[in-house]
Image (tube, helix red, strand yellow):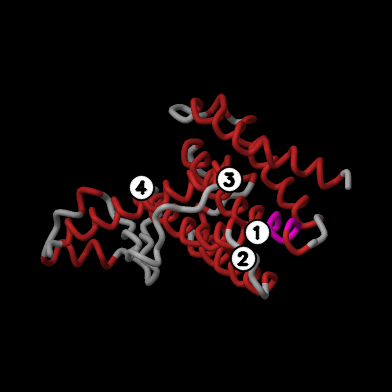
Amino acid sequence: MPFWLVEIRRRCLGLCYSIDKLLSTFVGRPPRISRRYCSIQIPLDLDSDEYGLDGEELAKALAKLGPEGWNKDGKMRSSLWIRFFVLISLVREDILELSLGPQQNGLYELATDIARRNKAIWQQLPQHLQYRPEIWDDISHDECFYAAMQYLDIVYNDFLLQRTLVRRARARPQELLRISRLIIGTILDVINNRSRLHGNNQDIPWIVSIFSIFHSLSNFFASK
């Protein structure tokens, strides 16, 4: 099978799978696409126009990739975010299984393992794309926006895990509150820098409407 077809199929299936997890999280229903019944393969961090390469040219493009499949040239491309979206969604499916499925034994141990894998995905990202508040002064603002979105996805997974432990294992809410503050702080960073953004301003109301629920939940647990 030609390389370009393999990569396009990986992208298409990965995006369908990931959007399904996003919708499942948003409406609180079980996923409709499970990796137990299909093979989710992570697309490589390559430009779309590199899919048509072959022979030595393809070998040179693949040589730019690190062992995990991330490109080492420091360029921010759509494939990077697609890879990240798919990896995060694989973890999200396990979180949804804990939160929406029947009560499981060893809930703390399962949650700890999922949290470890979630952190490992974050650590795979190139260093300059790992979000921190001061990143707005280091790279382009649109790139900062996407870095913030990936960070919110990572922290969102941690939030869902902690909320499940509070609801199902009577865990103390301190960690949930800490994560909620991280989410609110990151959203405020994006809002405070919205005048610098070009094509992403229209996404800010959507982000605020989704993640504002975390602030409400934080206040609820803080009052208990």
Q: Which of marks 3 and 1 is in front?
A: 1
The image quadrant where one finds the N terminus is bottom left
Residue that mark 3 sits on: 135
Q: Earlier in the sequence, mark 2 or mark 4?
A: 4
Amino acid of disc 3 = Ile
Q: In the picture, residue 123 is in which quadrant?
A: bottom right
**Residue 107 visible in image:** yes
Q: Residue 210 vs residue 217: left or right? A: left
Identify which residue, 207 or 128, lies in the foreground.
Answer: 207
* Residue 161's disc number: 1
Q: What element carries label 4?
A: loop
Q: Distance between the residues labelled 2 and 4?
A: 27 Å
Amino acid of disc 2 = Ala
Residue located at (67% from left, 35% from top)? 212
Q: How far apart are marks 3 and 2 (CA)?
A: 24 Å
Q: How far apart are marks 2 and 1 (CA)?
A: 8 Å
Graded by Cα atoms within 10 Å as few (under 14), some (14 to 19) or many (20 or more), the crowding at tag 4 reads: some
- Where is residue 27? Give x, y as percent: 54, 42
Q: Is residue 179 magenta?
A: no
- Where is residue 88? Give x, y as percent: 49, 57
Residues at badges 3 and 1 in contact (C-beta under 8 Å)? no
Residue located at (43% from left, 28% from top)? 199
Residue located at (62% from left, 71% from top)? 110
Q: Distance between the residues labelled 3 and 4?
A: 18 Å
Q: How far apart are marks 3 and 1 (CA)?
A: 27 Å
Q: Which of marks 3 and 4 is in front?
A: 4
Residue that mark 2 sits on: 115
Residue range in magenta is 162-167
Q: Residue 126 vs residue 13: left or right? A: right
For the stretch drawn in magenta, the main secondary structure is: helix
Residue that mark 4 sits on: 77
Q: Which of marks 2 and 4 is in front?
A: 2
